[in-house]
Image: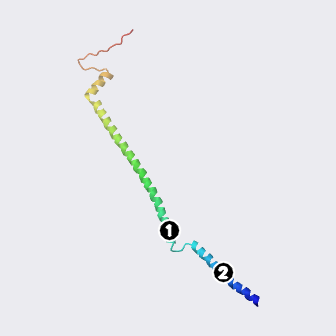
Amino acid sequence: MNQTARISSNVRVLEPDRYNESENVAKKRRSFKLSRSKMPLLVVMLLLIYLAVIFSSQFSSIASIKREVTGISQEITEMKQRNEFLRNEIRNIRSDAQIEKAAREQLGLVKAGETRVIVQPVAE
């Protein structure tokens, strides 16, 4: 009977240790599980990260579009200046003095009462 008591007393001594170990393991397992109160926080954090990524890509798109608009505005300014230059050229070409000059030089025409003189190169 003495031995049984020892065994049972040893078992009794060991049993609380086993319970403590199992409680510690259960506590450790609980620490890795997400509780229901942390789930909304996790969802909000993921949503915020998603929104940050979306907004940053949109802001970069807007910046590139603004650069493109600036470049096109500069092209428009240059084209307006070129158009103004060409309009001035057209006005000059349509003037009587330019028409007369072109008629004399390119077509060989003369005014009424004038004589046309052609200079021949000297043959050597």
- Residue underneath mark 2: 17
Residue 18: quadrant of the picture: bottom right
Query: Label 2 crowding class (10 Å Cα cut-off): few <14, some 14-19, many 20+?
Result: few
Q: Is residue 41 above or below residue 68?
A: below
Q: Is residue 97 above or below residue 122?
A: below
- Helix, strand or loop at label 2? It is helix
User: Closer to us: mark 2 or mark 1?
Assistant: 2
* Front residue of this view, candidates 4 and 73: 4
The residue positioned 48% from the left and 68% from the top of the image is 44
Q: Which mark is residue 43?
A: 1
The residue positioned 59% from the left and 76% from the top of the image is 27
Q: Is residue 11 left or right of residue 49?
A: right
Q: Is residue 56 left or right of residue 97?
A: right
Residue furthest top in the image: 124
Mark closest to the chain's N terminus, 2 or 1? 2
What is the x, y in percent for residue 20? Answer: 63, 80
The residue positioned 26% from the left and 26% from the top of the image is 97
Residue type, mark 1 in image: Val
Tell me which colouring the rendered structure shows. rainbow
- How many badges with numbers are in the image? 2
Q: Report the Cα–Cα distance between label 2 and label 1.
A: 40 Å
What is the x, y in percent for residue 80? Answer: 33, 40
* Front residue of this view, candidates 26 and 13: 13
Picture quarter with the C terminus: top left
The residue positioned 46% from the left and 62% from the top of the image is 51
- Helix, strand or loop at label 1? It is helix
What is the x, y in percent for residue 26? Answer: 61, 77
What is the x, y in percent for residue 15? Answer: 67, 83
* Front residue of this view, candidates 68 and 100: 68
Residue type, mark 2 in image: Asp
Picture quarter with the N terminus: bottom right
Q: Is residue 56 left or right of residue 15?
A: left
